[in-house]
Amino acid sequence: MLFDQDEWQVTYVLNKKKPPKEAPALNTVVRRIAKPGGFLGRKGDDEPGAKTLWLSMRDVAVFVQGLRFARMAL
């Protein structure tokens, strides 16, 4: 799974955090994507599952699409 700049930055915005200047590690982005889908990220938790990622990626995709449309309108 690879993410472009808009996608990984949106994961921070959806989690109400300021995006870093440089791209984070892939695992960090995957966990940030999974949080709105119900992933708690506790110490003993495994990696997020497919359903959790799918639910959250839908939101990320919609947000990114809206961001790109807004940029085109400017």
Image: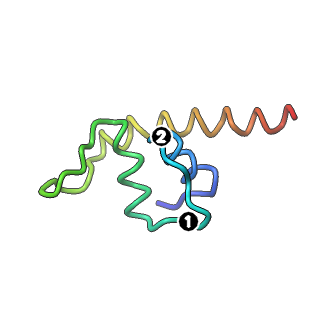
Left or right: 33 with respect to 6? left
Q: Nearer the viewer, residue 69 or 20?
A: 20
Residue under label 1, please give it. Answer: 23
Relative placement, left or right, of 63 versus 54 is right
Residue 29 lies, in percent from the top left, at 44, 56
Q: Position of residue 28 (x, y in %)?
A: 40, 60
The answer to whether mark 1 and mark 2 are in CB contact below 8 A is: no
Q: Position of residue 34 (x, y in %)?
A: 35, 45
Nearer mark to the viewer, of 1 and 2:
2
> Which residue sits at x=34%, y=36%?
37
SS label for mark 1:
loop
* Residue occupying the point 61% across, 57% down: 4
Q: CA distance from mark 1 to mark 2?
A: 17 Å
Colour mode of the rendering:
rainbow
Of the numbered discs 1 and 2, the one sitting upstream in the chain is 2
- Describe the element under mark 2 as helix, strand or loop: loop
The disc labelled 1 sits on which kind of residue?
Ala
Which quadrant is home to the C terminus?
top right
Residue 45 percent location from the top left of the image: 16, 53
Q: Amino acid at mark 2?
A: Lys
Task: Name the residue located 53 percent from the left edge and 42 percent from the top edge.
Answer: 13
Q: Which mark is residue 16?
A: 2
